[in-house]
Structure formats: structure tokens, C-alpha cells
Image: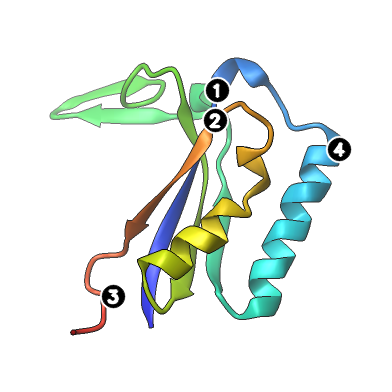
Amino acid sequence: MAQYAILIYDTPEAGEYTPEQQAQSKRHANDLVDSGAMVAAYALQSPDTATSLHGDMVTDGPFVDAKEVVAGVCIIEAPDLDAALELARRNPALQWGRGGVEVRPVAGSIPPR
């Protein structure tokens, strides 16, 4: 089975998730665990906690200044991209209108054709 990273994007000015949004996210994560698809998941702290490396230079803050930032990532197993996209579509972040998700295959995990 192939592995896919689901990158969860959010707008930095949106602030912390409400208790209801946190509960929705927890339910979604539990559904992925119960289905056997979840390999790992991590919420990231806000972009102002980032430290970036550019060559020999170390700076505070995210790597790029962007309208949306990566708020979390989860790794799932799915038989193919279509199945991974179906799981990603269920992410409640898509319903909040603040960001989106990106699905990318994990290098080396795609089964041969």
C-alpha cells in the first residue's frame, strides 16, 4: 500500500481553532485511525515559532512568507491517489474556508505497477 502525506494549510491570521473545530479534527483523526489508514499525524505550532535555515543563515520565522502556512501533516496509507484524495476530502479544514489540504505521495512508498 502506498503512503501519502496530507499537508493541512491554514491562514496564520485565523488564530487558534475553536473547541468545536478541535473536536471535528479529533473525530476525523480517529476515523482515519479506525479505518487503518493513519500512519502518523502532527499538528504544528504557529509559524512564528519556526526557525529557518537558508544556506549558512539562520532566521526566525517560516521559510517563506505566504498567505497560507502548513498547520499540520498526516501520513496515510491508501491503495492509490484516488483513495488518498477521498480521505483528504473528509478533512474538516476544508469546511472552515480558511485553508486547504495538499496530498503528495511519500517518496519510495508507491508500489510498482
Residue 11 marker: 1
Pointer 4 or 2: first along the chain: 4
Rendered image: mark on residue 99: 2
Q: Is residue 65 visible?
A: yes
Question: Looking at numbered disc 3 in the image, what kind of residue is underneath it?
Answer: Ser
Between discs 3 and 1, the one toward the N terminus: 1
SS label for mark 2: loop
Q: Quick check: 105 above or below 65? A: below
- Image coords of residue 10 (percent x, y): 55, 30
What residue sits 28% from the left and 75% below the top?
A: 109
The answer for how far apart the CA atoms under marks 3 and 1 are is 30 Å
Q: Earlier in the sequence, mark 1 or mark 4?
A: 1
For the point 64% across and 69% down, which residue is it?
32
Q: Residue at x 68, y 32 (%)?
A: 96
Asked if disc 2 and disc 1 are in contact, CB closer than 8 Å, the reply is yes
Residue position marked by numbered label 3 in the rendering: 109
- The answer to whether residue 62 is left or right of residue 28 is left
Mark 2 and mark 3: Cα distance apart in space: 27 Å
Nearer to us of marks 2 and 1 is 2
- Amino acid under label 4? Pro
Q: Quadrant of the N terminus?
A: bottom left
Answer left or right for 29 relative to 81.
right
Whole-percent x, y for residue 2 in the image: 35, 76
* Occupied quadrant, residue 51: top left
Taking 49 as reference, is 33 above or below it? below
Q: Label 2 sits on what residue type?
A: Gly
How crowded pointer 1 is (Cα within 10 Å; few <14, some 14-19, many 20+) is rated as some
Tag 1: amino acid: Thr
